[in-house]
Amino acid sequence: MSPTAFATAFIGRDEEVARLSGVLERARAGEARAVLVAGDAGVGKTRMLDEIAARAARTGTTVLTGHCVDLGDVGLPYLPFTEILGVLAGDERFAAVLAAHPVVGRLLGGGPDDAVRDLGGRLRLFEGMAGLLAELAEVNPLLIVLEDLHWADESSRDLLRFLLSRGVLQRPAGGAPAHRLALLASYRTDDLHRRHPLRPLLAELVRLPGVERLELRPLADAEVTRLVRALEERPLPDATVRRIVERAEGNAFYAEELLAATDTGSGGVPSGLADLLMIRVEQLSETAQLVLRTAAVAGRRVEHDLLRDAVALPEDELEAALREAIGRQLLVAGAGGTYAFRHALAREAVYADLLPGERSRLHGAFARLLGDRGHRAETAAERAHHYHESHDLPEALAASLEAADHAQRVGAPAEELHHLETALDLWTTVDASARPAGEGLDRVTLMLRASAAAAHAGQGHRAVSLTRAALAGVGQDADSELAARVRYTLAGTLLGVDSLTAAFRYSSEALAMIPAEPPSPTWVWAAATHVLAARQVGETETALRVARHALGVADQLKVTDAQADLLISLAVLEGGGRRSPEGRERLREARELARRAGSAPVEMRALFNLAIGCYEAGEFEQCLPWLADGLDRARRAGLLSSPYPLEMRYLQLLLLHTLGRWDECVRTAAADLAVLPSAGGYAAGPALYVALARGEAGAVERARALAGGAADWMATLVAAVVLTDAAALGGDAEAAVAQLRASLEALTDDAGGRPDVTVRLAALALTPVADTAASARAGGDEAAAAHWSAVADELVDLARAAALCGASGLPQGPEGQAWLARAEAEHARAAGEPDAAAWEKTVAAFEFGDVYERARCRLRLAEALLTAGRREEAAAEARAARETAVRLRAAPLVERVDALVRRGRLAPAPPGREGPAALTARERDVLRLLALGRSNRRIGEELFISGKTASVHVSNILAKLSASSRTEAVAIAHREGLLEPEAGASG
């Protein structure tokens, strides 16, 4: 009677579980209820019912489960109820109740078969079953689960009808107590064809007052993603997970099967799943199967007229076949006279079952039919596909180029890239005389166009590959303008993937290949790209000189978009940069020029720099409108995945995090990832900062997965912040410093430039370094104190260098200066110097707007004030820090503040927090080894657990003891008497 054990955690279905849990609650209170649970095969009915059964069992409810089985036309009568009775017969707790209903026992072979064959015998059986269940419910609340009613035999259907209409759901007569019983029965909606015998019963049952219907819809994409990640221990590429999620369409079983097939590399429908899907297809008539095969070639959806012409059947035969396929739940009728496969995998299975010649012939038919309707742009992609699959390559090439043009017009760069790459693949296979003619229709120009589409779609490395291929395709006799254009395009794509020295080399070559006189737009754009590359490699004087010259030429030639681009570069390079009023005015002018020129990429660059200028100046409220404008422009242009919008999306989330609008940050990030899952660190970053600060399980693992994914500079930066901070929060100085060094190595560009985030990473790593140095000094270990003090010197030097000369060549703004102040304060603490003044300066520095970091620094200030004997001031800072931490729901910070208040007796401890939470036996074992200075790996080895599990135990101990570091946890444990006296004595 115990529920099935599943290997993975139950995911999703919150609303459905809440509803069924409510049914169980009412049943326990004496309100008998039944729920008919409907859903497609594989959608998760059994998994959800098992979860409900497990929850019911934990509350003391008796759970009885019966299964219907597909035995074809020869069904076993009363099979699910016989299974339930078999379970009862094998449990001595129910022997007396079962013995009191001998007529029911006959189903188990306890009496002659004819006793239940006549009408009177059946009625006695039904009444006996109702009485048995009612008596069981008197002993204990009872949950009955019947699975797969679509396979139920007629006798079981009749018994179920009796139980729900006249039996256990009715209140007993004479004021007797109501039945404490719930019945949950599942069935497959996709198996209920029009003449299925369960249909009339369902229609009858749902009209009963105690019966309700619950339909399980497909899981949301986010839930399928969680399911796939939970099923697979090894890290999976994001692209693989997204493909599984897309194909599964919310069906948990399909997702599991597709995941299991990832090792085969076939990319098709897994054979077991295909066999399952084809069983239902093969039950159709030959004509209906022909219609399905033809529809599968058309795609997921097909118009009635197009299907009619392709299948070449009389209208009445086609309609009969369609009615059959729809009745069997394989096709569904849609708006506008269309039909679609109920699930894409069913279409894939049917398509894969086609013979090669049949497939080619049908594709050719659809291509010709679509062509006969006129060369409409919106059908170009379909025509290209059908021509390609029917091996008519010249027509496929022409249609692919037409489809690329359409995708460009509607702002769909990913689709444009797909069609251009298809055209490039076909180019060499199609005879030159059969290729489309026109300006710009050559292989190199198509590669440059594809490179631009890849960049706009956020595929920077693909853009580089395509431009390198274009460079390889430029012959010695190519004109200088084309050769220069290829090189400056390559330079631009290399900048997008942080290959800065290579970008500078190619932009230099481009500028040298084409003369400045007579002036030309190609030279202007070569110069504009060279300015960007020169700035990135530190050649500021070169960048300024070329930009000023090129701006005059662009103005002379009226190349307005290039003029705007050069104005942006000068706004960043000259004077006070984009933070200054002069810089912002120049950026506004550039934005207007780009808008007039209709250049969305340049306009977005201007808007990004306006936003980041406000951010660097600490003017957050002025920053948000520029970001809204930029993202709106990107959305209208279909360029949300291109570089500047990605930066703007990250900055918007970062602002919400910095301003303390954490719930909004998390919601916005989730919505962003749902729409554009390829955003990586740009969308995940600030939400991960929130998760870590709130102590959410899995934040560190998510950061590691982000770092281990595809090459993504922002993902590396986000992981660097989260993992360095996590090591600092755990009090692990060695891990924090190692993470800092590894992160800086990964983030430093090939020209040797370190990112602005260096100051933040250094300040974060300094926290456990200062803790460890102070602890060593207090313990009299001068050698260790000197070592960690020297490490602190190294880290503060990194922070100073980064803050005083940022990536733009200017000192960083308020944020960078605040992190530098924190680094200086931690450095002073590591050196054993009085640090209250340093922390006062740090708290003041974070007044620019970062509410969480200001609260963390207030905690440090409170500690310093307490050490200096300034108790009232310390208490005030602790209260302020706690108020912010509570508002943000930053539980770890609340814990650390409470620990300080308790240790320093600054105020009465919060209710229920008089002492540390109880440690488990395993946590005490870990704590003992922690006191001996063991690392997580060593703890794991000595306790025969994994290092990861040991790390979880250490985190739990820190939380329960309200400790901010391992050292502090051991000190608290000694003080609270949680360690045996000899625990710290042995080495």
Image (spheres, rainbow, N blue to C red):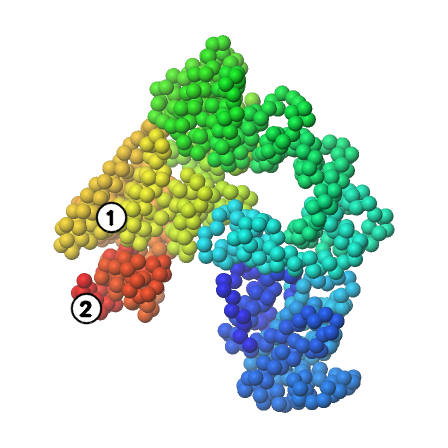
**Above or below, comparing residue 46 to residue 291 in the picture:** below
What residue does disc 2 label?
982
- Relative to 401, 725 lies left or right: left
**Where in the figure is residue 472, as x and y percent of width and height?**
50, 26
Mark 1: which secondary structure?
helix
Res 211 visible = no
> Badge 1, how many Cα within 10 Å: few under 14, some, many 20+?
many
- Relative to 419, 227 lies left or right: left
Mark 2: which secondary structure?
loop
Could you tell me which residue is drawn at 45 percent across and 20 percent down?
A: 510
Could you tell me which residue is drawn at 61 percent across and 87 percent down?
A: 98
Could you tell me which residue is drawn at 52 percent across and 62 percent down?
A: 10
**Where in the figure is residue 508, as x and y percent of width and height?**
41, 20
Q: Which residue type carries mark 2?
A: Glu
Q: Quadrant of the N terminus?
A: bottom right
Q: Nearer the viewer, residue 324 or 609?
A: 324
Instruction: Measure the C-alpha gap from mark 1 to mark 2.
Output: 28 Å
Q: Which residue type carries mark 1?
A: Val
Res 133 visible = yes
Whichever of callouts 1 and 2 sits on the residue coming sooner in the sequence is 1
Could you tell me which residue is drawn at 34 percent across and 59 percent down?
A: 947
What residue does disc 1 label?
769
